Image: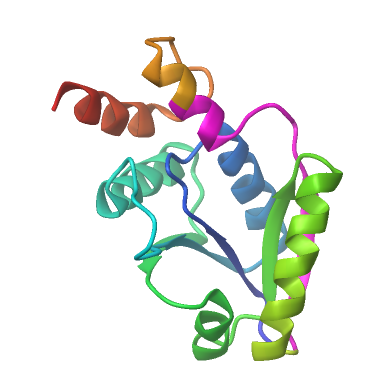
Amino acid sequence: MSNIAIYPGSFDPFTNGHLDVVLKGSKLFDKVHILIGVNATKNRTYDSEQMKTAIEKTLQENNISNCEVYVYEGLVAEYTNEKNIGYMIRGLRNNMDYNYEENIAEVNKLINPGLEYVYFRAENVALSSSMVKELNAYGKDVSKYIPKPVLEVMKKVNTD
């Protein structure tokens, strides 16, 4: 397998916690695919294409050149097979995240048995997309939890 990793998520919105995982992954792997998963049964708060653009701007602002952002509708493990990706990176905040990720890993290994998981410890265990959305819904300043380009997307949605 190649030294390429995937970092999948809904990234609704992409947070500084996600950025931390990307920074760590970009140092270990030749290339990282940041995959915005689109689930037809879930409603997104922020448009996936707008979030893709915001993540790309965030990568540029942080001088991260070996990561690319994709929007994908389908099974992540199938994507890894199609693109010859050998590693999946995930961030862990606590043991509940670990147990959740290990269950998903077992399913993904049925589809791509060669897929290896690399876990990064979260720097801010309270930070999550859900927390950012809830604080934002109550009019709280979320700028310290998300990259500036993501904040711009959120402000646009708030004013629409």
Locate residue 151, reporting x and y percent.
35, 26
Residue 155 at what x, y percent from top left? 26, 23
State how the image is colored.
rainbow
* Above or below: residue 63 compared with residue 85: above
Q: Residue at x 47, y 18 (%)?
A: 135
Task: Please name whichever residue, 93 or 33, is drawn nearer the observer in this view of the structure.
Answer: 93
Q: Residue at x 71, y 88 (%)?
A: 110
**Residue placed furthest toward the left:** 160
Q: Give yes or no for residue 141 being in the magenta stretch.
A: no
Count of residue discs: 0
State whether residue 17 is above or below residue 6: above
Residue 128: within the magenta?
Answer: yes
Of all residues, the one furthest to the right in this rendering is: 95
**Residue 70 visible here:** yes
Quadrant location of residue 27? bottom right
Q: Give the magenta part as a residue range.
A: 114-133
Report if residue 112 is visible in the image: no
Q: Nearer the viewer, residue 55 or 74?
A: 74
Q: Quadrant of the N terminus?
A: bottom right
Q: Residue 17: x and y, percent?
A: 62, 36
Vertical arrangement, residue 21 with respect to residue 76, above or below:
above
Quadrant hosting residue 32: bottom right
**Where does residue 139 sit, x and y in percent of width and height?**
37, 10
Say which residue appears at 54% left-offset and 75% top-offset: 76
39 horizontally vs 75: left or right: left
Horizontal side, residue 89 vs residue 80: left or right:
right
Taking the spot 76% from the left edge, 49% from the top edge, the residue there is 97
Judge whether 43 appears above or below 39 on screen: above
Assign the C terminus to one quadrant of the image.
top left
